[in-house]
């Protein structure tokens, strides 16, 4: 039986986590789960419905009305994010969502809600999930943990180019401010802050092409999968339960 593992990819904003995660998932025929997209969808719902997210009661009520799913997009070959039956993939990548998402992701009730979604989406192994707390909190048992980083100028330029290609009206300075602010909030929140897991392998992709990055990570994944130390559970499921 081909062993299937969990690959956790964490790191700062705009370090190319989702690019690598998508590539790995395609190559290994694994499921890719973009955990940041779930936080972004929750943020969109809060903004659209003017949820007063500084009030616990309002947050808990709002969360009961949120359903997030990923559905395959035949045109792009990737999965799109759907919020309450509506495709929000493009909308959640816009700058107003990026500006609020880290604040909303720091709310404990929101994190509990998203962690539940993450576990529901990943009942079986053969998963690549990217985010901020995947190797430390969501899947501390992941067989392969990667921690991605790149220098700030490179991250800003990549994210700016990506947003311009999508015709977003945004300046380089706005993108830099947003990335710096999110790095700060994501590493300083009380509940499950962004941290490098002790057993994570760091990939600094400042000077790597997408292909080089994939080759390197794939090689790591294949070695872990081939390792006799990794045993397949009989039902192919992982241990963390709701
Ligand atoms: O990966 P991303 O940029 O789409 O994530 C958006 C935000 O969501 C990020 O700034 C912090 C939050 N997030 C988080 O707190 N925990 C995760 N596992 C993933 C994202």
Image: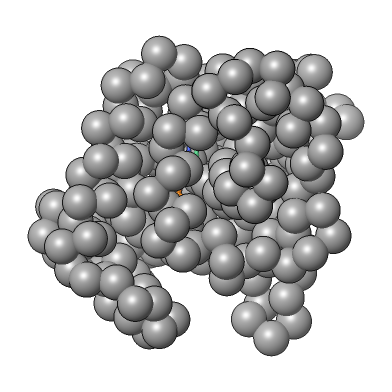
- x, y percent for residue 171: 22, 71
The number of discs equals 0
Residue 162 left/right relative to 77: left
Which quadrant of the view contains residue 183?
A: top left
Nearer to me, 161 or 77 = 161
The one nearer the camera, 238 or 101, is 101
- What quarter of the picture does the C terminus occupy? top right
Q: Which image quarter: residue 237?
A: top right
Q: In the rendered view of the protein, which quadrant contains the N terminus? A: top right
Judge by depth and name the residue closer to the eye, 103 or 52.
52
x, y percent for residue 71? 78, 64
Vertical arrangement, residue 106 with respect to residue 129, above or below = above
Question: Is residue 48 visible from the viewing direction of this image?
Answer: yes
Q: Residue at x 57, y 29 (%)?
A: 53
Q: State left or right for residue 214 relative to residue 28.
A: left
The reply to whether residue 224 is visible in this rendering is: no
In the displayed orientation, state which residue is furthest to the right. Answer: 235
As drawn, 85 above or below 13: below
Name the residue: 67% across, 26% down: 59
Point out residue 134 in the picture as x, y percentages from the top left corner: 51, 31
Q: Residue 180 appears in which quarter of the rendering?
A: top left
Please state the horizontal and vertical placement of residue 169, each as a whole percent of the image: 34, 77
Above or below: residue 155 compared with residue 121: below
Q: How is the image coloured?
A: one colour
* Left or right of residue 51: residue 36: left
- Which residue is drawn at the image coordinates 20% and 51% (left, top)? 177
> Going 25% across and 41% down the picture, which residue do you hit?
181
């Amino acid at each position: 039986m081909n062993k299937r593992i969990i690959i956790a990819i964490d790191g700062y904003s705009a370090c190319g986590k989702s690019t690598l995660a998508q590539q790995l998932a395609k190559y290994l025929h694994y499921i890719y789960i973009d955990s940041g997209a779930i936080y972004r969808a929750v943020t969109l719902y809060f903004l659209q419905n003017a949820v007063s997210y500084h009030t616990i009661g309002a947050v808990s009520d709002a969360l009961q009305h949120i359903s997030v799913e990923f559905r395959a997009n035949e045109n792009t070959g990737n999965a799109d994010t759907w919020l309450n039956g509506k495709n929000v993939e493009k909308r959640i990548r816009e700058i107003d969502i990026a500006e609020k998402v880290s604040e909303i992701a720091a709310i404990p009730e929101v994190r509990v809600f998203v962690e539940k979604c993450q576990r529901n989406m990943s009942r079986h192994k053969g998963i690549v999930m990217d985010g901020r707390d995947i190797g430390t909190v969501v899947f501390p048992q992941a067989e392969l943990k990667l921690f991605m980083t790149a220098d700030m100028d490179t991250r800003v330029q990549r994210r700016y180019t990506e947003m311009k290609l999508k015709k977003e009206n945004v300046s380089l300075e706005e993108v830099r401010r947003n990335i710096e602010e999110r790095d700060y909030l994501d590493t300083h929140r009380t509940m499950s802050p962004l941290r490098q897991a002790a057993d994570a392998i760091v990939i600094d992709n400042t000077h790597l092409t997408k292909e080089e990055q994939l080759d390197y990570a794939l090689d790591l994944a294949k070695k872990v999968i081939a390792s006799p130390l990794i045993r397949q559970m009989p039902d192919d499921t992982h241990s963390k339960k709701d």
